[in-house]
Image (cartoon, rainbow, N blue to C red):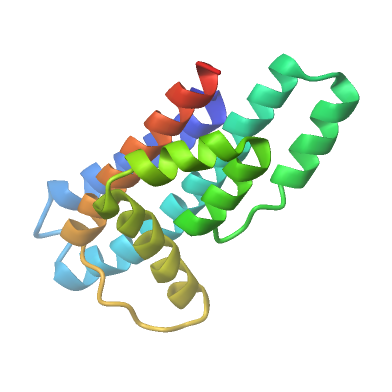
Amino acid sequence: MDLKVLAAQQRIDSLETKAKSDPVKFDIELQSQLARFLCVLASGLIELAVIQTLAAYSRRLSHPNVSRYVSASVGRLRNAKFEDILIVLGHFSPAWRDHFEATTPPEVKDAVDSIVNNRNQIAHGAQTGISLGTFEEYYKRAKSFIADLDAFVCSQ
């Protein structure tokens, strides 16, 4: 897995652990605020993982000029809900899209979409009802998708 992706994942893991470690220091309201912040970070992690994984694939198999173009194109991915990720994967190979569409469990797809939806609401000043526990479930599922994407693309 890409070092930038691992660093971002470790940052989120560390903050999540700290938020759960001291319930007195982090009351329910503060935990909820941290969950909102973690959603923003997790949304960025999902984007980063897709971008870095596909850019690494392109660097490995393409001419440097093609690789630069692919990296620049994929690098514009923002607020990537699961369908957006499938579209990008389909641009690389329709079989890749079909694979992830068929093998990704619905709860993982929903987790990715929920993280991004929460991030969008938070970014526009809306209050969200996300709790640290809910974020933890979404994040665990999103990390499983990131690991599956990395393993699949690296095997191609």
Which of the 4 image quarters holds residue 64?
A: top right
The vertical placement of 83 against 11, above or below, is below
The vertical placement of 100 against 22, above or below, is above
98 displayed left or right of 142 = right
The vertical placement of 36 against 129, above or below, is above
Q: x%, y% of residue 1?
A: 48, 22
Does the image show residue 37? Answer: no
Q: x%, y% of residue 87?
A: 59, 51
61 displayed left or right of 17 = right
Q: x%, y% of residue 2?
A: 54, 25
Query: What residue appears at the point 45 percent right and 32 percent down from the top-left corner?
Result: 149
53 displayed left or right of 27 = right
Query: What residue appears at the point 47 percent right and 41 percent down from the top-left corner?
Result: 98
For the C terminus, give its image quadrant: top right
Query: What residue appears at the point 42 percent right and 84 percent down from the top-left corner?
Result: 126
Does the image show residue 82? Answer: yes
In this orientation, which residue lies closer to the viewer: 72 or 12? 72
20 displayed left or right of 119 = left
Q: x%, y% of residue 17?
A: 22, 43
Which of the 4 image quarters holds residue 39?
A: bottom left
